[in-house]
Image: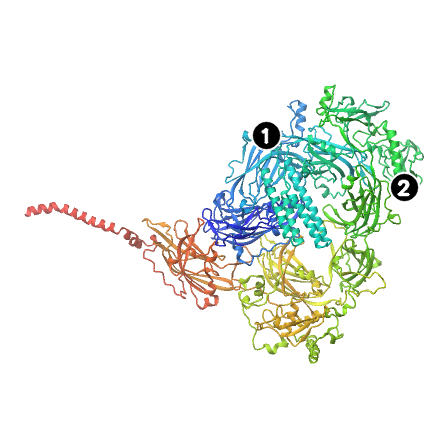
Amino acid sequence: MAGKGQVLGESLLGEEEEEEEEVDPGPPQIDPATGQVIPRPKKKKRRVNKMGRRKLLENLSNKPTDFQIRVKVLEARQLQGGNIQPVAKVTVANQTKQTRVKKSTNSPSWNEAFFFNFKKSPADLMDELVEFKVFNSKKLRSDSLIGSFKCDVGMVYLEPRHSFLHKWLLLSDPEDTMSGAKGYLKVCVCVIGPGDEAPSFKPVASEESDDIESNLLRPAGVQLQPATFTLKLYRAEDIPRMDSAFMQGVKKVFGIGEEQKELVDPYFVFSFAGKEVQSKIMYNNDHPDWNQILKIGIQFPSMCERLKFIVRDWDRVTDDDTIGTNILATSLISSSAGSGPEDDQFDSFLPTFGPSFVNFYGSTREYSDLPDEYDDLNLGKGEGVAYRGRALVEIQTTLGELPEVPVEDINNDDILRVQKFMRRRKYKLHAAFLNATMVSAIDAPVEFEVSIGNYGNKLDENTAPCPSTTQPTNAVFDGCHYYFLPWSGTKPCVVVESSWEDISFRLEGLNLLLKIIDTLEANIEQVRIGIKAKLPTPELAQLLISLLDQLEQDCRKKLPEPTPGRHVSNELDRLTRDYREFELETIANNVIKLKTSATDVLEAMAEVENYLQILKNIAKEPQNSMPDVVIWMISGDKRLAYYRIPANEVLWSQNPDYIGRLCGRLQTLQLKFPGLKAEKEKVSEVPAMLRTKIWLGLANEDDAWHRMQTEGELAVYAETYENQCNIPVVGWTKKGPLGRPKWSDSQGKCSLPRESFEPPPGWRWEGDWYVSPELSMLFDKDAGHKTYMEECYEMHSRLPGTSWGPATRPWTDVKGDEMAPKDSVDLPPGWVWEDVWQIDLSRAVDEEGWEYCVESTMGGYGPVEKRYHLCRRRRWVRTRKLVEDAKQKKHKLIQEKKIEEAAEGWEYAPLFNLKFHATERTMDMVRRRRWHRKMICEKKGADCYFAMKFEDEDDKEDFNAAYAAPRMFLTFKKPFKYQMRAYIYQARDLLAGDETGLSDPYARLSFLTQSSVTEKKEKSLCPTWDQTLIFEELEIYGDPRAIEENPPEVMIELFDYDKFGSNEFLGRTKAVPMVKLDPADARMPVLQWYPISRGQEDGGELLAAFELFLLAGSDLPFLPPKKGDLFLVPNGIRPVMQRTAIEVLCWGVRNMQKFQLSAVTSPSIEFECGGHVQESNVIKSTKKNPNFTENILFFDVMLPREELYMPPMNIRVRDHRQFGRKPTVGIHVLKSLEEFRCDPVQAELAEDDDGVQGGLVNGGRGGEHVIDMPAEERKVERKSGPQIGQPLKSFPQLELPALFRGKQEEPDPVVDEEIDWWSKYYASTGQTHKCKKYIEKGQDKIEVYQTHLEDVDFTNGFSDFCSTFELQRGKDEEDEESSVVGEFKGGFKVYPLPPDPNDEMPSKVFTNLPSSTPEECIVRVYVICGIDFQPNDTSGLADPYIEIILGNKKISDRDNYKPNTIDPVFGQMFELTTMLPVQKDLTIRIKDYDIISSDDVIGETTIDLENRYLSKVRATCGLQKSYCIAGVNQWRDCIKPRQILENYCKQNHVSGPHFYGNNSVKVGKKIHNLADYEPNKPVDPNVGPADERLALHVLHTLPMVKEHVETRPLFNPIQPGIEQGKIQMWVDIFPKSLGPPGPPFNIEARKAKDYVLRIIIWNTVDVVLDEESITGEKMSDIYVKGWVSGIDEKQKTDVHYRSLDGEGNFNWRFIFPFSYVPAEQVMEVRKKEHFWSLDETVQHLQPNIVIQVWDNDKFSMDDFLGTVSLNLNAMPMPAKKASSCKVSMLPDITTGSEVKLVSLFEQKRLRGFWPVYNDDTGTRTLTGKVEMEMELVSVEEAEERPAGQGQEEPNMNPKLDPPKRPETSFLWFTSPWKTLRYIIWRNYKWYFIGFLVLLLILLLVFLFLYSFPGEVSQWIVNG
């Protein structure tokens, strides 16, 4: 629709734009003030919800990827200024490229493409800017900018196909924005990532793209306005320390120091669209009050999306460090949705924000002098792992002004106004930890810390202590592989008190929207499952209706409002709320409409997904100032892993609709390693899995949390540790060098004597202090193990020169601590010895097992005895095995231990910072025990922090503000016992772990405190384990109903077993078991496919099911049947089997790569499905024939009936080598056989299927099939078939011309030079202006596919006969470019068989196969043109040429390279011969010609000729539209249509073809008549005989490849996945056995013809008079200049001096020779770019002639008076009289359609007046008229009728006389007499005459006076 300006920021995403209709399609209106096109008013039909720009670029990866940004600068129009020399510059992410300079025009056409390559992460790239600038190259650089336009890459990326195509950009002056449009620039931009298809930059055929208004990219219908982002920056808090304390320490030593400083010097940076402004630096301040205003000037609306806030730390010496980055999308804080309520739209608002805090996240807060390994997180890349402070800011946007100063101070009123936004309320964050499993840190005690903001940060000394961590606990082995924390019935709880602003109304609104989204997604999923399960339509409709009802009901829910007095809201809150209400209302209304109008479920679902996207777009809260909750796993002082939860997800509210979705709910969290470290180092383990409940709410509402804890009792304990050390002689004592207080916290940092604890106010003690041993101490080292190896070392020593004897400690453990002798090692109850004590000889020892060293405490043992060795030892081992029931064992053990240890409760360690253990060892120097005392709360909400009493002032100093935090526990009375059964059936498509390309997979399951492992399956990527794993006696605390509602997750990890080294991780997945509280529950779990992933990569799928039984007294279901020691998957859960046939077409292998350095020559293939294996025969030599001699293999197997459970087909290629070796050289896993399913072929139907089989083709009972035919005709039929066939087969040389020579000799084929193959091509691509004559004749068109032929729908990639399966090998390492090592060609058919083996088998599907022996073929490759090649030269162009490779043949067309172009027209045909399938891959490679260096490859594409040859759609040679025996559409195939039709019928078992005469034919059951296809007689004189034409028409009704051109993308191995351009081409394949092919098409590129343009400048009229003469009159010295645009050789007339009335007479001839392609109406210009260029660059330009009128000046620059540019193809008719010549005769951008245009190529000659104008001001003003005559002649005519330039000889055709100029026309200082006569005399004539008369009079008077006295006296005398 013309006039629908694309408005940015609004319909940019354009999922669905508004449908609208124009009010008036009249010409565009121009605003006189701005020169802008005024947008036309629109009338709405209906509003379709748009996505808006709210769909942000989210979840972008941070992994660097190859990207390419292509920019094509096409042309500019209406650039400001006349007669300028424009040049365009494009800058993308700091890379700049520029176009050529165009001479003297303000509408330049460049048509130049630029390619920018990046290896950047998508997240970074989307923020970069794309900037277009147009300069006037004549001016000085400082003021040469005409206008510019910029946007960010993300904006382009969000467009359809990631591109702007043929868009006009409105250029404006970034400095002076009120000055309006500076011109328009037409560009194409696209962003291409790996695997993206590049859109074509070719111009659209329709002329509408020239309609600037409809394609204009300009901000929302308005002028670009100057605007200012004003950021009021008030303050920041919680900024972490960034500087070293070195100087502080020095000052302290010298006693110079003042009070302790905060070691950070923050300043704030605000950046947008490439500009940034920064605040002042606040030295030594971690809570700076900046109170400054930062301003950035922008063009509004801006094309950039993201505001960045960065806090940096100033450093005197090094670079400033970034503390944190926050990115805010402008679309979240503004709306450009519409223009007002009358449009049924939401009012738009400018970006506004705050006052509100923004939070910064990044790396951990703890300062270290070492470089921070997670520094990237502070730059906003990746997920920040810790809170790093917050800043209070406010943003306003003001339009119409730019900032004068970027930074100023905030006034006091604002500082006071913002105080109310800083009002805090007390919040409590509660967390209960129920389980911690799969813990990876096992060397030291582990604790979990919960923090919000900086509250709860245990490692920061500045925060008040609070019970934010669980007690440190050692991880315990779970009996199989993993470790867990043994909390048993006392689950640790933590509570963090914090103070934040109360923004609950924001977070509650967000929670409401998220809940609506969750419900909607769940409902959509249900409908999807219904569609997948193919439910009947009424049921689906019911599901859909209930989904819509629920959605409508949800959208009507009320959004929370701020409560006055409790909440303080700002402007953005109000606007966001209104916007959300508006959107919800709109969705609700649309849902009602949809309910009534929906007809199709899928369409309705598409609409619903649109609503979902809108909801997601509004479910964002830009002003979420409450920091996220972060859970850290800490071991010692080291932070290991974290998990971040947005605060709103766990926020409590009184209204159930507003509660966070995870608030107080049991959830399973998988912790993450911080940063990208884990990804880079390929850490496969899970740091830990946590089951926890988290609750956040106001402190006065926290009884809600206590009410939720119905299952256990919340208890609070005071905790302190008693520390002792072991001093020789004295023994254990509290005195002596403890290194920590006698009573302390677990870290030993502060002193906590028991007696100094006082219950906080509102609390009282219950009971006394008691010893509470740490639980993990109660677990022995063998806990959880089924077998355990006891070891002890026998120690000997000697003195020098003596013999060996027992040492002082004869028996020790591995650490050297003394032990009892081996024979007195006790066997624990419940264990038995498996064998006797043995010497361990599997180590570096001598033959008796001894190892020697100099001194036992120093270590360094070796197996060889030397004389200086004084110690030796040997290791004795003995294995014991657990026999007693684990249940009793555990119970008894814990009882015994508790009794034994409870009294004492000591834990021992060599030093305090090492791991503690329960039993004392020799090395232990320290011990400690834990004391607890229970507290009870008497007053609700009282703080439970202890204020400690201190006698000693020094103690107070040490201790952190004299506060201590208690421990909290959720204690459960008793656990419930459960049993879990895991049914692991099979996996498919696992990752390869071994070099062979296979794995030896096994699965390991972890469920709470137990784990178990399946058996391993050898060498398979699709193992079927069919195993049930049973987890006995699981103790789970808590209400079984809660467990049923929210069961714990099962974590399944897959590994590849390796004999040596550690087993390789293959991926993991999670599952949730079905919970049965009553074992008699009849529900059956269903096997499901769970997706496996390893990091970012997909690792296959696992088919499994899980159930969890509560052991509640009643009996469990029977155990599943056993196979050996293993349980199988029970019936009812395992899939139902049925007898199935799989036919395998085993055709051949191709392109096998070398294996272990030698070629694969004799392969065979093994197929395995569901445990059944079939093997093909062996190919003798792949070099001679890579096909198998026996092609069909048959499986008769039992396979699951349901497709879901079908096992994959494993294809394995082995090579047969010498000595019987058969290495696996390639594998392919076919995940699903679904697409190969077919119905069995019924034997009896085969007879009469569509007249199949029989008929005349196969002999057979011919008579029965030819129906209703008179006897004579039948005979004729029988005779005629072979007659035509025979000569064709036996005499191939009697091809078409021979058969029809008789007829054809009289009329010679018609040849028209304007009709060639290119006419057919252009007619088919819609470029009608290049082939008008061809279209008038109505001749054939061809199919032009915009993709490769394999992707065209009906061809199915030519896999109808056989498919190509890529073979992989070995481990898939990321660094390898591609792991494809060959191809297998074959096919499969899967169909059910009768269950009874005695029933008759259906007949085979694969029959009538073509011969598998090699076939010699002629291949013709036609390459037409290239599109958008990647430029390889610095000029931004390339010199491409073609190279064809087929097998070992190579054709290089290097001599015919196309210089300086990236859109070359090749027009070349190459002919080769080949043997299929030995040489089947045809590669067309485009290379770039270089003189010096080697030629670079631009890109290549490969075509599999064999697939085309074998395909039934006959892709060897595309069928032409008509059968012609001469002319441009001459038949080129080697067999004629009739023969093709016969072959088709034979191949597809169709009866026929039976011809009745020449005009009708029967094929199958249908009769075709020629008259139906050709109602009128064909016009083309070259058509062939009727029967062939009829056969061709029939063929066109069949699925066959028609005559076509395909567009193939090119790829370069250096940048895999990124398209390097495209070529248009096609391939013909002619098997030699069918005879020689027809003549090839001539596709040579069109040649230009030479023309001469003669222009006679007769006169000029009404030229503006530019100068004043000395005498003060207006005049001009006129001359005319002319040139052809692009050739730029200028010619001038002589000067008509002193024109006083604007008239000039010249009679002057310009002569412009040029080359022109008539068929395409373009001028071809060949010229060298620079004097050093080797080749001429060819450009195709419009034939524009520019005529300018100038004023000649001798002593200064000539003055430009006016110009006119005429396109010789479409120029306005000249005016006959000067008076009727006006500017409105000329076409303008805005009034293109009203002027009548003619072509000089048709008219040949024109004479008349044309106007010249000047548009310096931006509007055209008439400055004169030129009378001229234009004549266009060909070169031949020019030689026959010569004419000279100017008035030179030969001055003829016509002869030009010198102009009759007025005598006043001359140059003054060359003609002094003329000057006197015409200037001086003419102007001063009367002065001269008067002067002479006066002179005469004076002379007379003088003479009179002189002679008078004498005469008088004479007279007197003489009387």
Secondary element at tag 2: loop
Indicate which disc, 2 or 1, sits on the residue closer to the N terminus.
Answer: 1
Left or right of 433, for residue 512:
left
Q: Examine the rendering and report whether any part of residue 1684 can be seen.
A: no
How far, Cα to Cα, is label 2 from label 1? 78 Å
Quarter holding residue 1203:
bottom right
Q: Residue at the spot x=63%, y=40% of the render?
A: 558
In this view of the protein, which residue sits in the foreground, 586 or 1156?
586
Q: Which circle, 2 or 1, is nearer the viewer?
A: 1
Identify which amino acid the numbered label 1 is placed on: Gln
User: What is the image's colouring?
Assistant: rainbow
Identify which amino acid the numbered label 2 is placed on: Leu
Q: Which residue is mark 1?
A: 419
Secondary element at tag 1: helix
Name the spot of residue 1039 as percent of width and height, x first: 79, 37
Name the spot of residue 1257 as percent of width and height, x first: 73, 73
Q: Which residue is mark 2?
A: 841
Q: Is residue 214 above or below residue 1773?
A: above
Name the spot of residue 1658 as percent of width and height, x first: 39, 60
Q: Is residue 870 above or below residue 1454?
A: above
Q: Residue at the spot x=56%, y=30% of the render?
A: 417
